[in-house]
Image (spheres, rainbow, N blue to C red):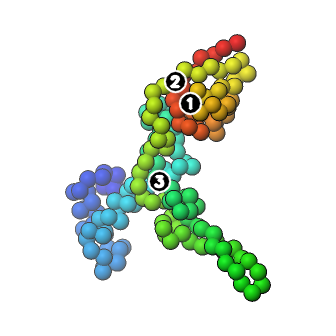
Amino acid sequence: MLAAKNDASTIDLIVAGCDSLSPNVTTDQRKAEILQRLKEAKHPRRASAVFSVENDHNPFILQDCPKCHGIGKVCRHFTTRGGRCVAREQCDSCGGKGITGEIERYFSNDNPEIVAECRSEGRVACPACGWRFRATDPHAWTGQRHMRCGQKLKLTYVE
């Protein structure tokens, strides 16, 4: 598939054969939209990230919108004659997508690996942030990084 490559010649070929976009859109705008679609297809959202040895347990992800925090909707509070109301509306910052379109690493922590003790019941105290977690909890441990602070840990088992 041509869309799998991310170089200028492939984008030019795709744009030349792309009639699904509005005819009033310039070629540069078409290229930008196609590049954005390729980026969204290649990189997962934060909730769908896969941690593996190949990506050092720190995959590239699509950046969540800072205004709506990846939801695509924002709450609007207003007062009417009957009282206060809350309405959920589409985020104007991301257009309801929940992403900015930029790519970032899942964790911003790039510090070197630290040794941490794992007790016999599986509890670990992270030396970077002090938070305690179970090494069996996938919401707290990727197998190499602590989910709360992103610190790489090498677990040593202690009785």
Q: Secondary structure at mark 3?
A: strand
The residue under the point 73% across, 77% down is 84
Q: Secondary structure at mark 2?
A: strand
Q: Amino acid at mark 1?
A: Ala
Q: Are marks 2 and 1 in contact (CB under 8 Å)?
A: yes
Left or right of 141 in this view: 92: left
3D distance between C-alphas at marks 1 and 3: 24 Å
Q: Is disc 3 surrounded by few (<14), some (14 to 19) or many (20+) residues within 10 Å?
A: many
Cα distance between the residues tagged 2 and 1:
8 Å
Judged left or right of residue 29, residue 66 is: right
Provide the secondary structure element on which disc 1 rests. Answer: loop
| Residue 128: image tag | 1
Q: Earlier in the sequence, mark 2 or mark 3?
A: 3
Residue linked to disc 2: 114
Residue 108 position within the rendered picture, expressed as x and y whole percent measured from the top left = 47, 41
Q: Residue at x 48, y 66 (%)?
A: 94
Q: The residue under label 2 is which amino acid type?
A: Ile
Q: Which mark is residue 63?
A: 3
In the picture, the disc for residue 144 is none
**Residue 3 percent coordinates (x, y):** 33, 56
- For this orientation, the residue located farthest to the right is 82
